[in-house]
Image (cartoon, rainbow, N blue to C red):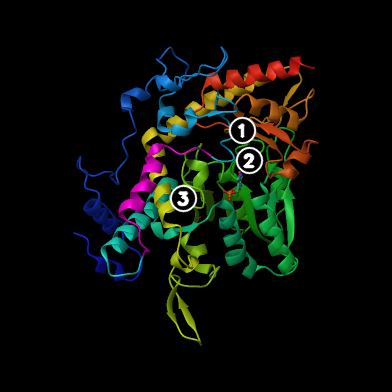
Amino acid sequence: MITPTNFYQPGLPTAEQLASWANAYFPADAAAPLTSAAPSIAGLSPAAFSPEYAPTSAPLNYAADRAPAIGAAAPVSHNEWRKDFPILNERVNGGKPLVWLDNAATTQRPLQVIERLSYYYKHENSNVHRGAHELAARSTNAYEAARQKVADFIGAPSAKNIVWVRGTTEGINLVAQAFVRPRLQAGDEIILTELEHHANIVPWQLVAAATGAVLRVAPINDAGEIILSAYENLFTPRTKFVSVAHVSNALGTITPVAELTAIAHRHGAPILVDGAQSVAHLPVNVAALGVDWFVFSGHKIFGPTGIGAVYGTDAVLKAAEPYQGGGNMIADVTFEKTQYQEYPAKFEAGTGNIADAVGLGAALDYVNAVGREKIAAYEHQLLGYTLEKLRGVKGLRIIGTAKEKASVAAFVLDSHSVEETGKFLSERGIALRAGHHCAQPAHRRFGLESSVRPSLAFYNTREEIDFLVNALRELTRSR
Ligand code: PMP
């Protein structure tokens, strides 16, 4: 049985300790409100997963009282997973069923995550790693178990390789300030690509301004793919770091991360991969990819906002300097000198976002239970369907036509502005992004300032896409 004194052991708990603590607190018996093992998915038995990749005549599973009733064209669903996401039953704009196609901005949360947060605050809330009491032990157990879940989810060798942060943006800033900046001299170079989110541009500009380093940008082709030969040509003996997105939030391009990494390493440069748009859509294994750093946000993978993770190899985490100073990250403090904890604690000054880290762990359990390959396969088909249907709309131009794409189907209409289109769709209950999506250079590559961006998750359906396309047809007919 767990005792609070477990937490006075130096360093992090081992995987065996975590497992035994998890068993102590969440025995897999019926009385336990939640278990640390895979969650049961509300109303969903594995058998219900079966004919999932194609529209079928399977019965609707919208709760009967929420079944869409607004007009013949309203979307309906055969998608089993939807019932885990209460918000998908919302009505908006005067009673229209919500069509959530803004998943690249943020995903929705399943009940399993919502209930896990509530359970944490009802039964476990305490600060972690301190305090000789039972609740400190419970919260530390839950927090560190969630760290292990992140490590397992992305194929990191150990929970020690995972640093909690607020999200991708904070993660990239951490790496920029803690690892890259101390290694830069004036004239050194950092390589980015033309499809990056502003979160993977501005932190490097700050570091470049502070050190006199220079940013070099790998171009993309007309399809929105990184031109590999041009990328490789950018490397010089002054190249000190590379930072690239795994999936572009504006174009949907899946970048060849393993190849980009191999090239960077051939030239002696470590690489960071921005996984904000990939983790929820593709199985990711950081060890297999060989990357040095990988960052992602919880809210893009059905978890809470305000929590995310940085993965680093042992070598880079050891080499990086503390990012912020304060409690939690120290081993010993005098006014003359402070000794820091080992990583990851070295990068986690102050009280972390404990509950939301636990919630992110629950989100990853949920995704694992649904099945990552299943999600990728379902979304691949749905994206293909979406692009094909959109191409049938008069005067519609798809932005980003890479061979390898995930989730994002951005477009512009020649008859209506991005703002007009977004407003028209919103009035019909369709939530998507109309703007520059924090990727202005990527848009400008295509002569645009903005685009309309439906972005998919595994709970979206062909009926929702038909509803979107019909609305666009109605709009384009009006002019
Ligand atoms: N990178 C990419 C590719 C993104 O799509 C986003 C979010 N739109 C971010 C970084 C920033 O993520 P966050 O706002 O969660 O820090």
Give the residue pinned by disc 3: 287
Q: Amino acid at mark 1?
A: Val
Compute the Cα span from label 3 to label 2: 21 Å
Q: Look at the image and say whether residue 222 sits in the magenta stretch.
A: no
Mark 3 neighbour density, 10 Å: few (under 14) some (14–19) many (20 or more)? few
User: Which residue was labeled with disc 2?
Assistant: 248
Residue for point 45% across, 61% down: 352
User: Which of the two labelled residues, at mark 3 and mark 1, occupies the earlier sequence position?
Assistant: 3
Which stretch did the figure color magenta?
107-128
Disc 2 crowd, CA 10 A, few/some/many (<14, 14-19, 20+): many
Q: Is residue 290 left or right of residue 111?
A: right
Residue at 72% in and 27% down: 421
Instruction: Work out whether residue 237 can be spotted.
Output: no
Q: Position of residue 151 (x, y in %)?
A: 41, 51
> What residue sits 68% from the left and 49% below the top?
198
Q: Classify mark 2 as within 8 Å of ligand 1 or not, answering yes or no.
A: yes
Placement of 65 over or under 288, stated as above or below: above
The mark closer to the camera, 3 or 2, is 2
Q: Examine the image and state in which quarter residue 383 appears.
A: top right
First in sequence, mark 3 or 2: give its number: 2
Callout 2–callout 1 Cβ contact below 8 Å: yes
The answer to which quarter of the image holds residue 411 is: top right
Residue labelled with disc 1: 408
* Label disc, if present, on residue 81 of the rendered structure: none
State yes or no: discs 3 and 1 in contact (Cβ < 8 Å): no
Q: Amino acid at mark 2?
A: Ser
Amino acid type indicated by mark 3: Ala
State how far apart marks 3 and 1 are (Cα): 26 Å
